[in-house]
Amino acid sequence: MRTLDAHPSAIGSPVVSPGRLQSLTQAAYWLIPPLLCFAIYWQGLTAWFQADDFAWLALRLDVHDWHSLLHALFAPMAQGTIRPWSERAFFLVFESLFRLNALPYRICVFLTQCASLTLLAAVTRRLTGSRAAGFCAAVLWIVNSSLVTAMAWSSAYNQVQCGLFLLTAFWFFLRYLHSGRTSDYIWQWIVFVLGFGALEINVIYPALAAAYALLLCRKRFLSTLPLFIPSAIFTVVDRMLAAPTAAGAYALHFDRALPATFATYWQWALISEYLPAGWNGRLEIALYAGLTLFLLLFAIVRARRHDLLPLFCLAWFVIVLAPVLPLRDHISNYYLTIPTIGLAILGAYALVLLWPQSVAWKLLAVAVAALYLIPMARFDRIATRWWNQRSWAVEHLVLGVERAHQLHPAKTIVLDGVDGTLFWAGIFHHPFRLFGVPNVYLTPGSQDRIEAHDATGQVADFVLPTGTVLQAAKSDRIVVYQVGPNRLKAITSRFENTAIASLKPELPRRIDALNPLTDYLFGPEWYPPDGSSHWMPRRATLRIAGPQTPGERLYVKGFVASAQSSQPPVYLLLRVDGMRLSEAKVDFKGAGFEVSYPLPNEFVGRKELFVALAVDRTFQFGSDTRELGLNVDLIEIR
Amino acid sequence: MAIETTRRQLLIPTLALCAAACRKSEGNLSDFTEEEPAHLSSQIHMADPRVASQLLSGWYQVEGNAWRWTARNFAAVLRPPPGSSSLGATLRFSLTVPDVIVQHLNSVTLAAAVGNLRLSPETFLHPCDAVYTRDIPPGVLSGESVRVDFALDKSMAPDGPDGRELGVIAHSLSLETK
């Protein structure tokens, strides 16, 4: 355990002399890091929602009673994550109180980060025995570019909150090492266990505590071992709940890419990821090599003098980063939010030890600090502004659609001029559900302006086929808006006239069965779609364009109703232009079903196919007297 | 000392949070869109108050937030949809002939006129949901609006406390370009 007495030469005056100046110094000591946080990231404070935020904001729509509330809070969601405090409760509570007023959410994030900065200063002071080191650690951490995402995007609150849990638990652990009080040990346990509700990374806390004890307070090492039990249990449960991901961005790769991934994170931890292209080159390499050399040499020199604190700081970086290193295809700078705490403590410790030395060492300390701080702070602000402006563009789009729905509640909203940024940060995440607007589409050709993201979804799901647009224009069922920088501009009349003059009435090869504008493609047998279901009875018909090339198949996709999940499979028979295709078994084991049929080559190039569907058995659910066959979501030839 | 200072640090942002809470309402959204000049609709859903002014005569108040009773004669004005002057259009009137009408009148015949063009009538012998659909040839629809007149051959006379003359139940009316 390091104390003030351990480094008398390295430490500033430990305290407290009476007088006003002393009070002001005290206040400045604790307030400057949070103020710096606001100064650098203030545009994150005024940012609106974007991307995954909308999924969390929509959680409220699924909460109807205590059972659904518990489900919303604790059921595993994307990639099997369970983050009740930092995602579920955070968005549920704030959405209930403030709806889409983003400022309170952002204030909460900033408050949490301010608390973490204060804790980091206190932890560092206790580790190094230096008040100045505590201050420097907080400053070095807050300027690190890995914090930009967390400080500008509400969905990254899990990183900020988990940092607070880890620092608090570690703070109690240090108090316990110093005092030996059981209460501190118990508080450490409580905070540690609660931390699992913030982020899975919390699982590494026992390794942090054990590493510290092993390196700097070996007599307490055994007290850290029981902490591994909750982590082991959590890991087992988490792996059981997480869907296996053999491919895609969240697949784990334990291969030769691990060192390269680590090197990328190490670079981002020292040099801003947001450096402009002009910086790439010698200057960036020199900066990277210089900072790396400085930290490693410092750690080696101190280790040779039996001071293992720098090694612990490096261990903090490696231990916290370790769980995300196998995510070879999902390297994100915000994963560095908590690991960089270790480097901030290391850097601060180095600076305060160099400062009392000769002028040359002082100059080195100033130079190293400046080379790290100035580019980081500068480009943090630029990156935060980018997040901020993107969120505002999404806000204008989303609230514009809400306004359009207020004015035209019976019509389908179609957007023109959407680019990739707006699509992937907004539309793709279905923000309009929040206002009860289920269907918002893009004009034909929009996919040409939006880059594809294979891992996350298809732009085509949102683009209306030309024939459908033409049909909708003729029946005055759409309102069309051009996306502008500040507002949506209605262009319905111009668009409809152009569409009727230029678009051909061709049938689509992909039919979104839930889109009310495609109703002209379905026979009269179908029950009307209601936004989330489109049921066919025992037999039903539809029209679709023929395949473009030989070998294409006809796919039928749909949902399984909860009452169907206990039913045996049904067989779906298709006839296309009178020709019987093979029967397909529709299983009700999952949340949805998909069956496909090979299409004879003679259908290739046909402008219209008449498809007749028939199931061998129908259902009746509860008080619904309808004879229900299948709930179809998509019919597609590809 | 650290804890006390932290408390003070938290006070100001907490007050800001409370102030932000007072701004709960999302406010006026009118700045978020720039609308086209108002024009008539080609489609009338009977419960939509925004197009109620296009129902000229012979329509009673909205019931069940979905439909209206008509009188024996009723009329509305619609916008000719884009391209309809050259391509022609389809008139669709979605209605219900209720049991009570058939019981009292045995059958009912609906006729319509779009502008000066008379459309062929249709007779309903049984209670049913129906769509009265007629083609409008090119050249008939021009200008910003067109009047559509409907006439039933008979209606239910005012009876008891309900002093209304009742025809059929209307759901929606639209013109669509062919």
Image (tube, coloured by chain):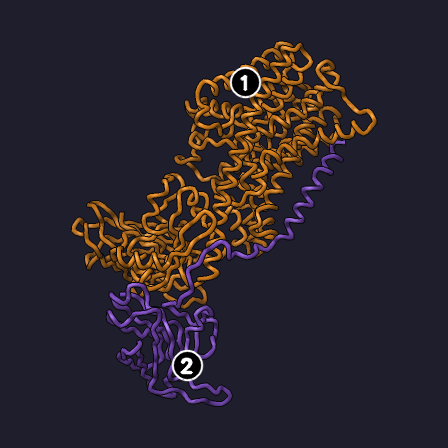
Chain colours: A orange, B purple
User: Same chain for the residues at labels 2 and 1, yes or no?
Assistant: no
Please give left or right for residue A34 compared with residue A606 in the image: right
Count neighbours of disc 1 (C-alpha within 10 A) and say few if under 14, some if 14 to 19, many if 20 or more.
many
Chain under numbered label 2: B
**Residue A383: image x %, image y %?**
51, 34
**Residue A294: image x %, image y %?**
56, 15
State the residue position of label 1.
A291
Please give left or right for residue A626 compared with residue A384 in the image: left
Please give left or right for residue A579 compared with residue A284 in the image: left
Q: Residue at x 46, y 89 (%)?
A: B159
Q: Return the residue nearer the eye: A313 or A135.
A: A135
The picture quadrant where one finds residue A115 is: top right
Q: Quadrant of the N terminus of chain A?
A: top right
Whether pointer 2 and pointer 1 mark residues with C-beta atoms closer than 8 Å, the reply is no
**Residue A209: image x %, image y %?**
63, 26
Quote the CA–CA distance across marks 2 and 1: 84 Å
Chain under numbered label 1: A
Q: Residue at x 58, y 23 (%)?
A: A343
Q: Residue at x 22, y 48 (%)?
A: A548
Q: In this orientation, does residue A77 appear?
A: no
Residue B146 vertical position relative to residue A143 in the rendered view, above or below: below
**Residue A547: image x %, image y %?**
22, 49
The circle on residue B58 is 2
Q: Return the residue nearer the eye: B170 or A404.
A: A404
The circle on residue A487 is none
Q: What amino acid type should be assigned to the residue bearing mark 2?
A: Gly
Q: What amino acid type should be assigned to the residue bearing mark 1?
A: Leu
